[in-house]
Structures are given as C-alpha cells and as structure tokens.
Image (cartoon, grey):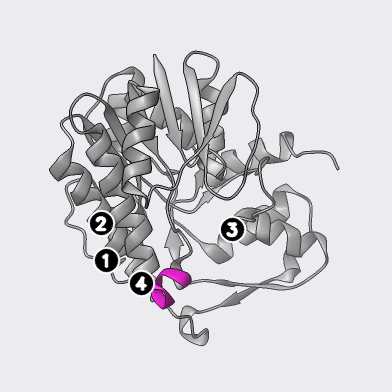
Amino acid sequence: MKLLVIGGSGLLGSKIMRAASRGFHTIGTYYSHPFEMKNCEIVRLDITNKDQTLELIKRLGPDCVILTSAQTNVDRCETHPEEAWRINVEGAKNVSEACKKDVKLIYVSTDYVFDGEKGFYTEEDVPNPISVYGKTKLAGEKTVQNICNDYAIARASVLYGWNTITSKLNFITWVLDKLKKGEEVGLFTDQYTSPTLADNAAQALLAILKKDKRGLYHTSGKDCISRFEIGKRIAKIFELNEELVKPITSDKIDLPAKRPLKCCLDVSKAEKELDIKLITVDEGLLEMEKTEPKN
C-alpha cells in the first residue's frame, strides 16, 4: 500500500510517516521545511495550488492520503482570515478533488469545531465554532464529506510531543522550555482540553487506514484537564519547579481569537472501533520523559 502524508514536516505528519514507513510505501510532503526521513520519499507541495495538488497526487498514485497540513495558529487565523480560508478550506478542497474517485482521504480536524459550552463532545454532537480557525476547519470537514467517496475525519486536541523535524514548539514543549529556564508561566485554570500525544494520534490514524474505517472519529487524549493542571503535571513528571506554574483565567488575557472553555472530546467510539488505547496526559508525559532527545 502507498500512503501519502500531506504535512509530513509537521509534528503529527512526521509521527505518522515514521510509524507508517515500517509497513507502507510512505511519501511525505513539506511546504517550507525540507526534511529527510529513513525509508520515506519526500516531495514539496503547496495545497493551495490546485493544479500542483491534482498533478502530484495523480502522479504519485497513493492508495490513501492523510491530510495533516493546516494553518493551526488560532490567533493568526483570526487576524488573517483569508489566509486561514485559503489553506484550511481551499487546500482541503484541492486535496479532496484529487482524491474524490478512488483514493481514501483521512482529514485531521480539531476540537475547536465546538463552542466549549458542554465538554466531552461525542461524534454525534453538533459543531458550533467560535473562532475563524474552528470555522475554517469545520468548513474543511464539510468539503471532504461533500467531495470524497471514501473518507474519514479524525479530530484531535492540543497535539504535543517531541518535534524532530523543526524547532517549532507545541504547548507542552513551550511550557517545558519556560520551566527549564526557570521562568514563570501563567496558564489558564478555566480552559479545559483533551491533550493528544502526536505519537498516539498517529496510531489512531493508521488504525483508521488499516481497518478501512469511514466517517468521523475523535482521536484525542482521554482526559478533560485545564491548561494550569497540565502545567503542574509537566513540572512534576519532569522534576521541575511547580511553583513557577501560575494560575490565570482567560478573561485576564486579551487574545485575538476567542477560545472554547471546555472543549474535551469523548474518545470511546474510536477506542472501541479502532481497537486502540488513547492515553491520558500523565501517560503521554511519562512517554515523553522516557524519550526526551539528548542535546
């Protein structure tokens, strides 16, 4: 089987590629960060270029495409809505058009399609995004559903893990970086999420492929935890100063984009149908602690 991972230079894309390369002919794309990976083919792709996207996917002839590439900076999406729409919606449309007849498409989405009023959202709950980012990702979901014959949508939340391709920080590595420098870090006590170890999400996405599943899956971590509590867990597991983690509430910070307050995902459907274990924050952090790159 031939797998094409669009966004292979990103955190999740690189984890998928590394895991998939042991059993699939694996190809990954990048846009601005060229990279190499053992047993994988690497190509450049701009998904906002329709002709290039159609030509590349036709030429490569994958059996499945996993689309991880997106503009995920929530505040940038809010201040640059045209860019967010071009990447997250038009890009998804271009990939969908290239896959629509005989290529399976697995589209990676987000918990931010929900408004955060309820928490522990299931796949049956009706989305109601409150930010440009969430709105564009929901529009991307609908685009995939409307165009593709064979698709799955996998929603994740606050992806984290060691990034071996670029120096880009995610929430967990950002907090770690601050604490290791002895700097205070203010974290929200009123914003709850289901943080997702990228390696674990990669397993879930490959399970969708291997089991040939279709439809919608929540593939996040299984906790519902505040960002402040996550920070305390990071400090404890990595033996750093917990006193540097300071509680704040989201109304004290003026950010461009509104954040949902309780956007946790219910992963019971994915665990049952994909026959996988989606892990807790403590389990994910312990795995990171064991595999921390040595400088």
* Secondary element at image label 3: helix
Could you tell me how far apart the alpha carbons at marks 3 and 2 are, in whole angstroms? 22 Å
Q: Quadrant of the N terminus?
A: top left
Magenta stretch secondary structure, dominant? helix
**What is the quadrant of residue 260 in the picture?**
bottom left
Judging by the rendered image, the residue that carries numbered circle 2 is 138
Q: Are marks 3 and 2 in contact (CB under 8 Å)?
A: no
Is residue 213 visible from the viewing direction of this image? yes
Q: Position of residue 141 (x, y in %)?
A: 24, 49
Q: Amino acid at mark 1?
A: Pro
Q: Amino acid at mark 3?
A: Phe
Judging by the rendered image, the residue that carries numbered circle 4 is 81
Question: Residue, x 42% and y 53% (percent of image)?
Answer: 70
Judging by the rendered image, the residue that carries numbered circle 3 is 171
The stretch in magenta equals 76-81
* Mark with earlier residue (3, 2): 2
